[in-house]
């Protein structure tokens, strides 16, 4: 029987039985131009400057999310009848969830103001695009169903939403293992097969839940998430490089607005995005890491010394130096930043481009609080206690939850190598 195989470093063999409508659609979606673009968008932005192996793409991650979602639905289907239309919509949404991501992970988005989730929806609903044609060819309403799932605007919350967007969703389950493997960090491993084995559906609420035997696997997964943020996503080199990308793009945007950016031309997708112009979906397909990196190469020879220095630093790993202020309280950290600004200014530099303050935070597990209105985010556990079976929140049964609910915060001042010596010591 016809079968297409993808060999993946995380999931090993990902198989598509193309004689089945579901698999045939997913395999065709992978080959659409809009999806193939993700080969040219790195999953971890500038992380390869700290971890040389971290050059994997959002393409491989998106296929991994689809495969993880498929494994989750296969397991949940052992406990609950899953409607085939719900299943294909969920798998298509898992595969296509990153279509709208711009270059260099979230950095380009923060500079341009473009919302990747909104762009994803626009690409899916564009009737002239391959994605829409393939989805609507399967079911006329499927593009709208997929877009609604990704917007999460169809209450009540169900196991489909849990698979796609929760603290135990297919996205996180894949990227932790994938990023851990590709960086070689050793911090993000956890037992996915056992975690899948412990998944079920609560019949009353139609929510994804973990059986009691899986509590330890959830704890290991959340601890892996903590360590990956601490050691990879928030690594000082990664944050320094991403901050420099942001400064370079801000400088280029300023020059473009003033008509002083000599390259690329105004009709180029990078220039149009910097100017705040809306790209057609065809133009967006050409907006990727390669396009922006080409700009950095051109700009490294710019007649604007600020832009040239930033881009040269990114190309040849001449990164800003880090001063860790995490152990200082916010007012004290603010004083160090203010002193550094004055020192650089006094030395003849422009602090706007010679330094930046970076404060970044994440909470490994956010315990559900009813007054926040954040229903649907919690991890649910089925507790078969002697008093009777009940559905409880993870924090009520795991002693690790209290520690995991603490926010991980880094405060850092990053200063260009040329001006690091003029900045007063931070301690």
Image (cartoon, rainbow, N blue to C red):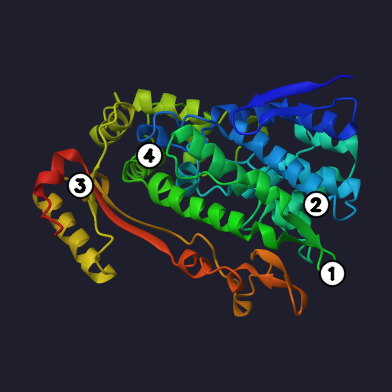
Point out the tag, 2 or 1, that comes first from the N-terminus: 2
Camera-side residue: 29 or 427? 427
How far apart marks 1 and 3 lie (CA) works out to 61 Å
Q: Nearer the viewer, mark 4 or mark 3?
A: 4
* Relative depth, front residue between 387 and 368: 387
Reading the chain from its start, which is encountered first: label 1 or label 4? 1
In the rendered view, does 120 fall on the left or right side of 225?
right
Image location (x, y in percent) of residue 128: 78, 33
Give the mark, 4 or 2, whose residue is nearer the N terminus. Answer: 2
Q: Kindly report the distance in space between the C-alpha atoms of the residues bearing marks 4 and 2.
A: 42 Å
Chain-order first, disc 1 or disc 3: 1
Classify mark 1: residues with Cα within 10 Å, few (<14), some (14-19) or many (20+): few
- Which residue lies under the disc numbered 4? 245
Instruction: Note whether residue 33 is visible.
Output: yes
Cβ–Cβ under 8 Å for marks 4 and 2:
no
| Residue tagged 2 | 76
Residue assigned mark 1: 204
């Amino acid at each position: 029987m016809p079968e297409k195989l993808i060999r993946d470093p995380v999931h090993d063999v990902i198989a598509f039985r193309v004689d089945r409508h579901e698999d045939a659609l997913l395999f065709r979606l992978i080959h659409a131009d809009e999806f193939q673009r993700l080969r040219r968008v790195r999953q971890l932005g500038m992380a390869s400057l700290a971890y040389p192996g971290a050059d994997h793409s959002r393409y491989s991650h998106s296929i991994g999310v689809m495969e993880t979602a498929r494994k989750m639905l296969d397991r949940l289907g052992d406990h609950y009848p899953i409607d085939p239309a719900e299943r294909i919509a969920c798998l298509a949404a898992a595969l296509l969830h990153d279509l709208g991501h711009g270059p260099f992970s979230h950095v380009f988005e923060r500079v341009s103001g473009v919302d990747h989730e909104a762009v994803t929806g626009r690409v899916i609903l564009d009737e002239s695009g391959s994605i829409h044609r393939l989805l609507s060819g399967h079911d006329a309403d499927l593009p709208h169903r997929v877009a609604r799932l990704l917007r999460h605007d169809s209450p009540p919350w169900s196991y489909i939403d849990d698979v796609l967007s929760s603290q135990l969703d297919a996205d996180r389950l894949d990227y932790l293992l994938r990023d851990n493997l590709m960086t070689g960090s050793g911090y993000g491993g956890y037992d996915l097969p056992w975690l899948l084995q412990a998944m079920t559906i609560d019949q009353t609420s139609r929510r994804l839940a973990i059986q009691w035997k899986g509590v330890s696997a959830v704890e290991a997964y959340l601890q892996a998430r903590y360590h990956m943020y601490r050691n990879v996503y928030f690594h000082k080199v990664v944050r320094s490089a991403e901050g420099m990308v942001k400064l370079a793009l801000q400088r280029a945007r300023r020059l473009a607005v003033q008509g002083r950016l000599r390259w690329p031309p105004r009709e180029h997708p990078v220039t149009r995005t910097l100017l705040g112009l809306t790209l057609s979906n065809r133009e967006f397909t050409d907006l990727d890491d390669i396009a922006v990196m080409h700009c950095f190469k051109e700009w490294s020879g710019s007649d604007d010394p600020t832009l040239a220095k930033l881009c040269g630093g990114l190309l040849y790993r001449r990164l800003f130096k880090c001063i860790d202020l995490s152990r200082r309280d916010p007012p004290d950290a603010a004083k160090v930043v203010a002193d550094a600004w004055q020192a650089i200014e006094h030395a003849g530099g422009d602090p706007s481009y010679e330094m930046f303050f970076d404060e970044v935070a994440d909470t490994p597990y956010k315990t559900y609080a009813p007054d926040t209105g954040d229903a649907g985010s919690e991890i649910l556990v089925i507790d078969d206690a002697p008093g009777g079976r009940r559905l409880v929140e993870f924090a009520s049964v795991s002693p690790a939850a209290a520690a995991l609910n603490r926010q991980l915060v880094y405060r850092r001042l990053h200063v260009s190598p040329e001006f690091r010596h003029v900045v007063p010591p931070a301690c």
